[in-house]
Amino acid sequence: MIHGPTRLEGSVPTATAKNAVLPILAACLLTEEPCIIRDVPLLEDVRTMAKLLRSLGVAVELRKHTMRISAAGNIERTATYDIVRKMRASYYVLGPLLGRFGDARVSLPGGCAIGPRPVDLHLKGIAALGAEVNLEHGYIHATGRPLRGGTMLLEGASGPSVGATANTMMAAVLADGETVIEAAACEPEVVDLAGFLTAMGAKIEGHGTPVVRIRGVKRLHGADYRPIPDRIEAGTLAVAAAITRGNLEITGCEPEHMVSVVDRLRQSGATVEAGKRRLVVSAERRPAPVTLATAPYPGFPTDLQAQFTALLSFGHGTSVVTENVFEARFLHALELNRMGAKIDINGRTAVIQGMEYLSGAQVMASDLRASAALVLAGIAARGETEVQRIYHLDRGYESLEQKLGALGAKIERVSY
Ligand code: EPU
């Protein structure tokens, strides 16, 4: 329940990146030695990944924000439908299980609220390493031992794939010989995974560019690692400052990972000061119209499209937002319209006619970033907003209502 409008002000820390932590946790399967991962965010998706690893026989201990993971002893090779259907990132165990044991069975994920999310590129990647891939009873069964290095182009209709690049890297680090991934995803989370694999003894070059080269090694060892800050959480907080015409200092973030986001915020008229591991964002007026199109990194992230759509709903003029990564990622727009926004969706494009104000309403979250967008809109809108299905929010934001509440938002989690 949110009561608006309020202006947010103060200083807020950034959590560690969910989308860096999830593949890194899966990568711990690549060694029998223990790994320590620090500053792990306490999110539903992280709990699901821990549950998946435990179901495989991995020892996972969490103390405060530090996770100790040991994949010694007997490790199962099957990720069941029950877990995969809850979280697509469960797919990240495919590469490491195959790489280390030559055998992995992972349930095919089902539908997804943000549109079709095929796994063909993941399968293309491991097939290029010599794995035999079969679909049986709803499961992908991949086998191959030893895997051998190969060259592959991992480009889909929407460009590179974060997940397929990460999975293929994890399968290739223990393969015989050299692997070359062309059209690799350049996202900071992929670079961070390469950083972790390198800390485990892997030989990787070119991460962060479209051509990644991996020289297989015989074995990997344990590592102690702190993943990168969450650029999407930091971006969500930056939008919170702009949408409430407030003033927020966002600490512990990495502005270098947020260049396109800072650029669009400035275009909207917000003042953004980017320092070392910190951003200060403030706004005084309704946002100016902005044209933006999501794209693979370093382009504008799809994971901030919903939050920007909410911001531009309060704009002074007409904005155009094009979603190029996930074709059906606009369900939040329909909910924002219930709050008085004027958003027309035409295929992959949203035309947003800015309104002076939105009014609170009962709305329904459809996915993680959509729920963040509705919460931000609720803080800036007049009156009461009730955001339902906030379990989506808990998948990727740790206690967001507490963070926003400490900055002045009138927001409360209500259990029914
Ligand atoms: N694609 C294919 N074939 C594949 C894999 C992907 O065609 O085999 C397509 C997808 O359908 C999409 C595009 O390629 O059109 C990019 O998808 P990608 O594989 O890069 O996405 P992902 O790895 O499934 C990760 C994040 C998403 C984020 C995207 C894009 C994780 C756990 N998830 O997903 O995060 O939107 O990259 O940056 O890292 C979120 O955090 O809310 C979230 C959805």
Image (cartoon, grey):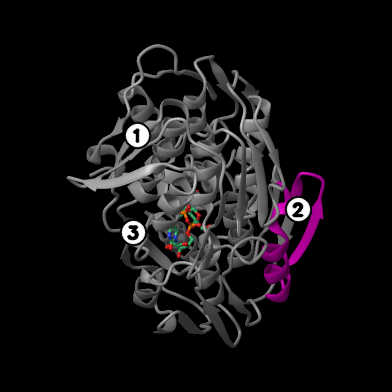
Rendered residue at 49%/45% (across/down): 400
Q: How far apart are marks 3 and 2 (CA)?
A: 35 Å
Is 74 situated above or below 379? above
**Which is more toward the observer, 382 or 312?**
312
Q: Mark 1: which secondary structure?
A: strand
Distance from label 1 to label 2 (Cα)? Answer: 37 Å
Could you tell whether 143 is left or right of 375 in the image? left
Disc 3, SS: strand
First of labels 3, 2 by sequence position: 2
Residue pointed to by mark 2: 256
- Residue at the limit of the structure toward the top, as seen here: 73
Instruction: Please tell me which residue lies in front, 46 or 162.
Output: 162
Give the residues drawn in magenta, as a range. Answer: 254-278
Label 3–label 1 contact, CB within 8 A: no
Q: Name the residue under label 3.
A: 386
| Residue type, mark 3 in image | Glu
Q: Which of marks 3 and 1 is in front?
A: 1
Q: How crowded is mark 3: few (under 14 residues within 10 Å), some or many (20 or more)?
A: many
Residue designated by label 1: 104
Q: In which quarter of the image is the C terminus?
A: top left
